[in-house]
Image (tube, rainbow, N blue to C red):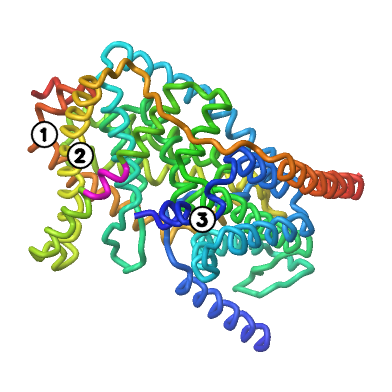
Amino acid sequence: MTKKEKILLKASAAFAALFAVAPAANAMHIMEGYLPAGYCVAWGLVCLPFLIAGFISLRNKVKENRRSMTLIAMSGAFIFVISSLKIPSATGSCSHMTGTGLGAILFGPSAVGILGIIVLIFQAVLLAHGGLTTLGANTFSMAVAGPLVSFGIYKLCGKLKANRRVSVFLAAFMGDLFTYCVTSLQLALAYPSESGGVMASAVKFLGVFAPTQLPLAVIEGILTVVLVIGLESYAGPELNNTGFLSGREKEAR
Amino acid sequence: MSVIDRLCYQSRLRYVNAEEKFVYAILTLIFCVASRSFAVALIAFAANGILTVGKGGISLSRYCRLLLIPVSFLVVGTAAILVDVSEIPMDAFAFPVGDRYLTGSRATTMEALRVCAAAFSSATCLYFLALNTTMTDILDVLRKLRLPSLFIELMMLIYRFIFLLFETAGAIRISQESRLGDRNYRTKARSFGEMGSALFIRALSRSNSLYDAMESRGYDGKIRVLSQQQPPRKKKILMIAGFELILAVLTIREIWVRTGGHG
């Protein structure tokens, strides 16, 4: 027993050392080539209806007013830049925002789908976060599921007349958490545990990613609040003109 | 800013026909993922390394450092595949924790190794494409694949704007830092948020003036760019075809063996 315990101790020490060496705690992009081929295709197909809906809504927006073309592109670039800048993190490791909650609050869930997939392609090719084969799975978790939850919570808080800061925080925080849960589930579906099946595996993936993802979600929530409050106090008229900010702000003004 | 984007402009393979590079990278990627075999992974890993470092002239240390980017995900994710919590110890290893075991079977260990190999070699495929092809060339290839033009144009504009916004963000960061904007955690978080909102406001006004500039130069909803294409070389196409054929054979064999083994 003691010998085994020693081995365990050594293994955990080595594991901890690897953590210290391993460079970044990114948002949870599934790495290139990490999912089996079938799952890559399946998640791509799942995303497709959302992407088509987003594409049609964007195309109509551009047809209606051609000026929105540069605006939409600028929004996409904004999401990319915000999500690739280092954020101040409590532990000192270098981490990034996902920008899902922010995107959903600013641009609505349909536009975020298309912008999200473009941002993810750029992240894969320019930053090596995520990958081309896992693009479908990553798009689903970060550009479809997360933003939908964020947007839903944001709207719900609006209906309940909750405090602005609280509702923005909750939207970004829950969006991030949901993205993390969906990604864990995607991994678990691809790699079910031998003893407990998909659910046990999901618990494992949730567990191993929790130390990096939970603080990140809180930080992302706080930063999104500061950002949105800043936007509202300095750029109210511009935001209203773009027609991007969802209904509630217009009513409030 | 993106190191990869800077490096790809220095690559010696930059002016090789983009479609050849794209097809090579994507096919190799597909075979790596589909086969999950060590042989394919090893061949692809070696080929991409030779092409990127040897032919492309990207420095080896840079390449290795780039390869480390996804390692944190790989380590954490694979740990979750490898280790199982169960009351019964399995055949590969088992550590008692309380009345349960942190355990794993030979089959999962094998699978975890396979996943690591496949993931690492596919990452090198992605790096080959990213480090030797400029984004504008990739967009050209995507256009030839008949992706909707709105999508391509959006990508093109976003690619351009990313650098504009990075520059603006960098300037804001410098002025924040020089005014003690990252004195403690509280101010750091506030600085970041305020930088974000300032960046967005700048981006809005930038996009408006950019549209005005484009329209005054005759923008009619389409952006036309001259693309400089190198004609594809027969020899290279044959080499790529031969290489992919080998990978295809290995992949089919691997899948056949695995399904045969289970059945």
**Numbered mark located on residue A38 in the image:** none
**Residue sitting at 31 percent across and 27 percent down?**
A108
Above or below for B45 versus B162: below
Rendered location of residue A139, percent (x, y): 49, 37
Q: Is residue A69 visible?
A: yes
What residue is shown with label 3? Answer: B11
Query: How far apart, in angstroms, are the residues tagged by discs 2 and 1?
Result: 9 Å
Q: Amino acid at mark 1?
A: Ala
The residue singled out by tag 2 in the image is: B200
Q: Nearer the viewer, residue A248 or A62?
A: A62
Q: Is residue B4 magenta?
A: no
Q: Residues in magenta?
A: B162-167
Q: Which residue is mark 1?
A: A235
Residue A176 image point, x, y percent:
38, 45
Under circle 1, the secondary element is loop
Q: Secondary structure at mark 3?
A: loop
Real-space CA distance between mark 3 and mark 1, rounded to the nearest whole angstrom: 43 Å
Most prominent secondary structure in the magenta stretch?
helix
